[in-house]
Amino acid sequence: MKKYVLSFLFVAFFFSCNKNKVVASAQTDALIRETVNTLLNNWHKAASEANYESYFGKMDSVSVFIGTDATENWTKKEFEAYSKPHFDKGRAWNFKVLERNLYINNSKDFAWFDENLNTKRGTFRGSGVLEKKANKWKIKHYVLSVPIPNEDMSEVIKITKKNDSLFRSRFK
């Protein structure tokens, strides 16, 4: 009988510990989501305020920024050089998040997202990757794009054909 009671207690203890892990994991995910969302919101806000230090301080030293033009595949240093004159004039860009989807890996040290943005030129889309190192989240990769409705694609192809041809000629 004593053996059964000990077995029951062990099983009950095991399941209670497992339940705590699930709750802790959910709390951790919620905290990560809040932290990453705040970082990204503040990143966009820093651009709208032309706060160069705050904006680029949220990007990792080896981060990449891919813009809407096919030639815009910049290292952080290249993107800083491109952006500095805009920030110095006191008017960078102002992106307002319409919606964002955020994902977290099992190790809780990488997050990736996609977002729809309201800009002065219309709806843009952003997507990116963040990494947590030394207990701090940094943007590693960001892609800015313009979503094109499928029914408008043939018109866009006509408009961009010349520049697209010039771009692709680099790879022949």
Image (cartoon, rainbow, N blue to C red):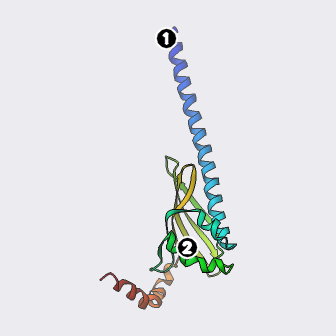
**Camera sees residue 66:** no
- Name the quadrant containing residue 158: bottom left
Please determine whether, in this image, residue 58 is positioned above or below residue 167: above
Q: What residue type is labelled 1?
A: Lys
Say which residue appears at 64% left-offset and 77% top-offset.
Answer: 87
Give the side of residue 132 with respect to residue 86, left or right.
Answer: left
Q: Give the camera-side residue of 107 and 52.
A: 52
The first of marks 2 and 1 along the sequence is 1
SS of the residue at dot 2?
helix
Quadrant (top left, top right, bottom left, bottom right) of the C terminus: bottom left
Q: Nearer the viewer, residue 6 or 167?
A: 167
Residue 164 lies, in percent from the top left, at: 41, 86
User: Does residue 118 appear left or right of residue 130 in this picture?
Assistant: right
- Which mark, residue 3? 1
Label 1: few (<14), some (14–19) or many (≥20) C-alpha neighbours in 10 Å: few
Q: Which residue lies furthest to the top in this view?
A: 1
Helix, strand or loop at mark 1: helix
Mark 2 vs 1: CB contact within 8 A: no
How many marks overall? 2
Is 158 above or below relative to 51?
Answer: below
Give neighbour class at mark 2: few <14, some 14-19, many 20+ (Cα, 10 Å).
some
- In percent of width and height, residue 137 lies at 57, 55
Disc 2 marks a residue whose amino acid type is: Glu
Using the rendered image of the protein, determine whether residue 124 is visible from the camera's viewpoint. Answer: yes
What residue is shown with label 2?
Answer: 80
Is 46 located above or below residue 37 in the figure? below
